[in-house]
Amino acid sequence: MRFVIVGGGPAGTQAATDAARFGAEVVLIERDIVGGAANLRDCIPSKAMIATGGAKSYLGRLEEIGLVDVAVNLDFDRLGKRIAGITERLSMAQEQILRSQNVQIVRGTGRLLGPHEVEATTDEGTSVFHADAIMLSTGSRPRIPDWVELDGDRVLTTRDAYPPKVLPEHLIVVGSGVTGVEFVHMFSSLGSKVTLIVSREQVLPSKDPEVAAVLENDFLRRGVHLLKGARAESVVRNGDEVTVTCDDGRVVTGSHALLAIGSIPNSEYLNLEAAGVESDTWGFIGINHHCQTNVAHIYAAGDLSGKLPLSSVAKMQGRKIAEHALIGHTVAHRHLDYDKAASAIFTEPEIADVGLAEADAFAEGRKIRVTKVPFASTPKALINNDPRGFVKIISDPATGVVLGGSIVGQHAAELISVIALAVTAGLKVTDIQESMLVHPSLGEALADAAD
C-alpha cells in the first residue's frame, strides 16, 4: 500500500513513522522544514526565548534567596544562534528517523490531481505519485489583516520575532490570546517595555477568569501596559516608530508592533476540488472521528483540520490516521476526544488546563465539585521562592471521577500531565489523593487539591 502525505509537520511525521512501521510504502512531501514550520519556527523558538527570559527573571530574584551581586547580560545574537541550532537539530533528527524507516522524503509542494494522485513540484520538476491513501497536513500561517503593512523589521508577525533583528525598546502586541500573552511575557522578561492591546475585558478571553487574573497581575507587576476593550484597526510605521490606532480612538506608539491574531490554513494550493475534498469558507478541511475527509481514503490533520491547533493533537491525529488507513480493520480504534487534550501557556507563571472548565460547567448548569489549593501552602514552592498560582481540580460530585483541572504556577505544563491522565483514564480524585507523591515537590499540591 502506498501512503502519500502532504505536509511534514507533527502530524505528517508521526503518520509517516507509524505507517512505515505497519508496512506501507510512504512518501512524505514537504516544501519547507521537516518537523513543521508552525512547530519548529513558532512553537519551539518561542519556548527557547521564554526559557532565556525566565532565567533572566530568576537571576533578578536571587537576592531574595541569599545571593547578591549576580549580574547578567543578554547576548541577542547568541540567543538567535541558539534558536537556529535547536530548530536545525530537531529537524535533522526527525529526517534521520524517517529515512531509517525508508520513508521517501520529497522536497517540494504537493497538490492533488485526483482522488488517488498527488503531484509534487520540486526544483527539478514535477513527479506524480499514485496513492492508496492520502493525508493532508500542510499546517497554517499567521493571519494578516488588510489594515496592516508588514515589513519584517518593525511591524512583525510571530515568525519574524524569533528573535527580531534587535530587541524592541517598546513592543506593542496586538492580540491577547495564547500567542499574544506569551510574547508579552517573553519580551518583558528580556527587558522590553510592552503594551498589550486587549479587545475584551480580560487577557486570555477563552480561559478561566481566575487564571487570567493571576497572569494580569503578573503583567502589571512587570510594568506591562494593558489597553483593555480596544480593537486595533490600523498599524502604521513612520521611521523608527510604529503607531497602532484602536477603534475607540486610543493610540499607542512604540518601536515595534507584533501581530498575534490567529492563523489561517495552508489549503489554497492543495487543489482540493480535483479530488472532491470539501473545505469551509476559511479553508479548513472538515473531518470525522477517524480524521477522514468527505473522501474516505483522504485524511486531514493538524491545523488544516480546524481542530485544536496543538502539536500534541496533530501528532495523535497522525498516529490515528496511520492506524485507521493501514490496520484499522484489525484493531479496536479508539477515537480522539479533543475535549481531553491538555494545553499550556508558557508565561510566568505557567498556565495549563485540561478537560472540563469550571465556567463551562456552570454555563451548562452541570453539577461539579471544585477543589483548589494555592502553591503558597506547598513547601517546594516556598523553597523555590515562587508561591504564585494554584491547582484546581474539577470532579463529578456523585462519582468522584476527575473531569478537568487547571494549574497556574511553576512547571504547570509538566504537572498538568497527572490530571490529563486522570481525565483520559476516568480516574477518581481518590486515585490522585492516595498516590504517595514525593516530598517536598510541587506535585504534592495535586494530592492536596484532590483531597
Image: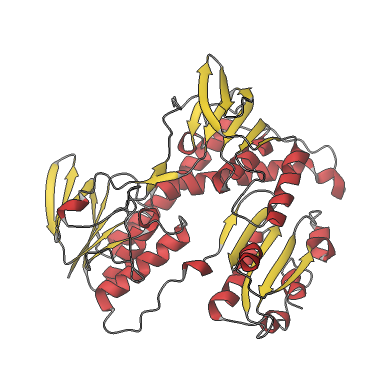
Horizontally, residue 226 falls left or right of residue 84, namely: right
Check the image and report above or below for 116 versus 87.
below
Residue 373: percent from the left, percent from the top?
78, 67
The picture quadrant where one finds residue 352 is: bottom right
**From where the camera sits, is residue 30 visible?**
yes
Q: Residue at x 60, y 27 (%)?
A: 168
**Front-lying residue, 3 or 407:** 407
Taking depth in this image into account, of 164 and 135 the one nearest to the observer is 135
User: Is 408 on the left-hand or right-hand side of 239?
Assistant: right
Q: Residue 116 location in percent, x, y?
A: 14, 61
* Image-quadrant location for residue 136: bottom left
Residue at position x 34%, y 52% in the image: 284
Q: Residue furthest top?
A: 239
Q: Is residue 280 left or right of residue 222?
A: left
With 161 as the anchor, is 16 left or right in this view?
left
Number of numbered discs on residues: 0
According to the image, what is the colour scheme of the structure?
secondary structure
In x, y percent, where is residue 327? 27, 78
Placement of the N terminus among the 4 image quadrants: bottom left
- Residue name at image x 62 percent, y 47 percent: 51
Q: Residue at x 72, y 56 (%)?
A: 210
Instruction: Measuring from the top left, give residue 335's x and y in whole percent.
Output: 40, 75
Q: Is residue 192 visible?
A: no
